[in-house]
Image: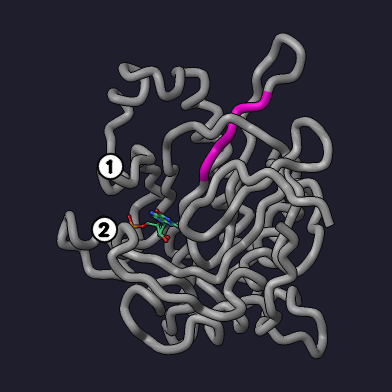
Amino acid sequence: MARRKKIYEGKAKTLFEGPEPGTIVQYFKDDATAFNAEKKDVIEGKGVLNNMLSEFFMNGLTNIGVPNHFIRRLNMREQLVRACEIVPLEVIVRNFAAGSISKRLGIEEGTPLPRPIIEYSYKDDALGDPLVPEEYIAAFGWASQQDMDDIVSLALRVNDFLSGVMFGVGIKLIDFKIEVGRVYEGDYQRLIVADEISPDSCRLWDIESGQKLDKDVFRRDLGSLTDAYSEVAKRLGVMPKGATPMTKPTLIN
Ligand code: 5GP
């Protein structure tokens, strides 16, 4: 198979030039990192699970009319996505306190928030993705006021969709992070949900037991990450019958 051009290698994914202009192949690695890559490991099967779960969530968003970059899954570890210009922000939506907001404000994890709270981090690994006020976003030209209106609308629609889907399988959506990309259509630009939606970028707690089924299992050494993600995939009917996530890489470059 022809060697493909690598565009970017991130902590959990590698991007390759896609087969047609305006497309990208997103390859999901097994690498897990936390605390700005201070903690690292390779969790066999994680990439396969996140590829399938992100496909499931993005397809769900497409079905309810929320624009996103997903085109189709190519194989166990890769999906074809639409190329876009990533807005340099992590858009975080919180329904219940956990993680950094709990630490920052001294709110016990699991406390319901009065309403969904949206916050933004500036995407910069060297700076540790610092939380930024909206004032910075316009001032530094990362996104316009119109973009911010669209980002809030996308974030809240993703929140409603994900909360509902997860609630249906007995899981509480505590919080999540999305990234947004800009695409150009003629003279117009549009913002779409990009990157991935998976247990790497959400907090998911079992409604009954409170068991964590997300990347906090890795961050906080709470057991097997693959078991946690497999549980989410099984409940959503995403894992094909008889499949195991321990599939060896099918890579191609
Ligand atoms: P916190 O600010 O509490 O650490 O994270 C809030 C939510 O955003 C969590 O669901 C967390 O997984 C997600 N999140 C925040 N920063 C990142 C990041 O750099 N990468 C990923 N994958 N998720 C993030």
* Residue 90 left/right relative to 185: left
- Circle 1 — which element? strand
Please report the residue visible at 34 percent of the width from the left and 56 percent of the height from the top: 113
Q: Specify the quadrant that holds the N terminus.
A: bottom right
Please tell me in which quarter of the rendered image ligand 1 is found.
Answer: bottom left
x then y, percent, for residue 177: 46, 52
Residue indicated by mark 2: 100
Asked if 145 appears above or below 61 in the picture, the reply is above
* Neighbour tally class for label 1: few under 14, some 14-19, many 20 plus, Cα within 10 Å: some
* Mark 1 or 2, nearer chain start: 2
Asked if 177 appears above or below 44 in the picture, the reply is above
Identify residue type, mark 2. Answer: Ser
Picture quadrant where residue 65 is located: top right
Q: Is residue 158 magenta?
A: no
x then y, percent, for residue 3: 75, 51
Separation of residues labelled 1 and 2 (CA atoms) = 10 Å
Q: Is mark 1 within 8 Å of ligand 1?
A: yes
Residue indicated by mark 1: 131
Asked if 234 appears above or below 115 in the picture, the reply is below
Nearer to the camera, 92 or 179: 179
Picture quadrant where residue 192 is located: top right
Residue stretch rendered in magenta on the structure: 179-183
Identify residue type, mark 1. Answer: Leu
Q: Is mark 2 within 8 Å of ligand 1?
A: yes
* Neighbour tally class for label 2: few under 14, some 14-19, many 20 plus, Cα within 10 Å: few
Asked if 140 appears above or below 173 in the picture, the reply is above
Please report the residue visible at 49 percent of the width from the left and 65 percent of the height from the top: 200
Nearer to the camera, 91 or 249: 249
Labels 1 & 2 near each other (Cβ < 8 A): yes
* Residue 17 left/right relative to 112: right
